[in-house]
Image: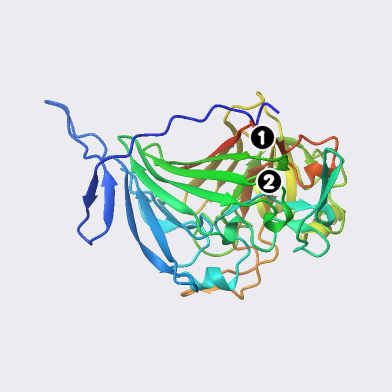
Amino acid sequence: MSTYIKHDVIRAAIALALLGPLGLLVFGCGAQPEDGGAAVSPAPTVSESEFGTMPDGEKIARFTLTNGSGVEVKIITYGGIITSIRTPDRNGELGNIVLGFDELQPYLDGTPYFGALIGRYGNRIAKGSFTIDGVAHQLDTNDGANHLHGGLVGFDKKVWSAEPFAGASSAGVKLSLVSGDGDQGYPGTLDVTATYSLTNDNELITELHATTDKPTIVNLTQHSYFNLAGEGTILDHELMIGASHFTPVDATLIPTGELAPVEGTPFDFRAAKPIGADIGGDHEQLAHGQGYDHNFVLDRETASDLELAARVAEPISGRVLEVFTEEPGIQFYSGNFLDGSLRSGDRVFAFRSGLCLEPQHYPDSPNQPGFPPTILRPGQVYSTRMAFRFSMQ
């Protein structure tokens, strides 16, 4: 499958490590003006600090990426979780635009995948079962009768190894994980890397790679919940998704196999509209998902290039998020199961207070012959990129 077999991109060289003013390990390149010219934008930096301790005593690290515009991204080695993204509004005020916590314990207690890396398989697999080359495999069933987001102990609950880096135009962290043969029921030992890079173009790029020693299935994604206002609901956010079709689901949120046109339905986001415009409509699919919780089939121009999939704008703050992907689909989730039981300080994560836009292959693809395949075989390299671009209007 061409979208899965790509050459690894060339990583930026690891820059010289400097000790920061707060005793944090900081990596970066100083920005020097050209002779007689104005100073250039400061190079992005990455700093490392301790975030918490696992029950077995293992330390969890936090990496803070900052670019020349002041955009700041915080990532921890538990679950590869993005705990915070701070971007400016139209008045230049920085604010956190994702749902997350400042401490480890709430993540250990359990969240709806706030900010996490998802694997081995993002989204749902019907009854947790699939067949490769005539061999049946049974996975954990952790979403009713179905398998969701990699199982009971998916990649969102693993501790990743980390290697920070910084260069002239980007800084980030490369995370690594080995998922053993039989992990959550999946066949094959899977070697995974996930690289987060923050650029001076205000893009957070996520690159995901994996190899296996046995035929298996792979569908990795990133599961941040965004609220560009920083508080309140996301119903006034104006959303565009470049998709003429979506995949309808049954009552358990498993795709029926149909690619249904969005035209004339609440699922038509080809022109930007407020998320709340049609979310309360009388439509069977909205009832199944208690709102939007569906995969959209992207209208791609190429098979594998990085292309714009979705754009979200928040009218009061002026913040804009654009999502680019190499994947054939994107899951839009409108925070329907948030209920206010989780909070961070004074911030309550209430009903529809965050939205997810998860680039991926379609849900239940291993059991849907008409969907793009997700099988990875020995000798192949799973490779995909996504980019979150931050701007203002």
**Marks 1 and 2, Cα distance to the nearest angstrom?**
9 Å
**299 shown above or below 220:** above
Residue that lies at the very extreme toward the top in this rendered image: 302
Tag 1 secondary structure:
loop
Q: Quadrant of residue 271?
A: top right
Instruction: Report if residue 392 is visible in the image.
Output: no
Q: Residues within 10 Å of mark 2 (few under 14, many from 20)?
A: many
Q: Nearer the viewer, residue 53 or 29?
A: 53
Tag 1 residue: 378
Colour setup of the view:
rainbow
Q: Position of residue 365 (x, y in %)?
A: 79, 42
Q: Position of residue 169 (x, y in %)?
A: 34, 35
| Residue at x 27% of width, y 37% of height | 41
Q: In screen coordinates, is 245 left or right of 311?
A: right
Q: Name the amino acid, label 1.
A: Pro
Q: Name the amino acid, label 2.
A: Gly
Q: Nearer the viewer, residue 33 or 148?
A: 148
Count of numbered circles in the view:
2
Q: In screen coordinates, is 33 left or right of 389?
A: left
| Residue at x 47% of width, y 75% of height | 346
Indicate which disc, 1 or 2, sits on the residue closer to the N terminus.
2
Tag 2 residue: 188
Residue that lies at the very extreme toward the left in this rendered image: 36
Instruction: Report if residue 137 is visible in the image.
Output: yes
Q: Position of residue 109 (x, y in %)?
A: 57, 73
Q: Position of residue 29 (x, y in %)?
A: 25, 39
Q: Nearer the viewer, residue 240 or 257?
A: 257
Q: Quadrant of residue 59?
A: bottom left
Residues at marks 1 and 2 touching, judged by CB atoms closer than 8 Å: yes
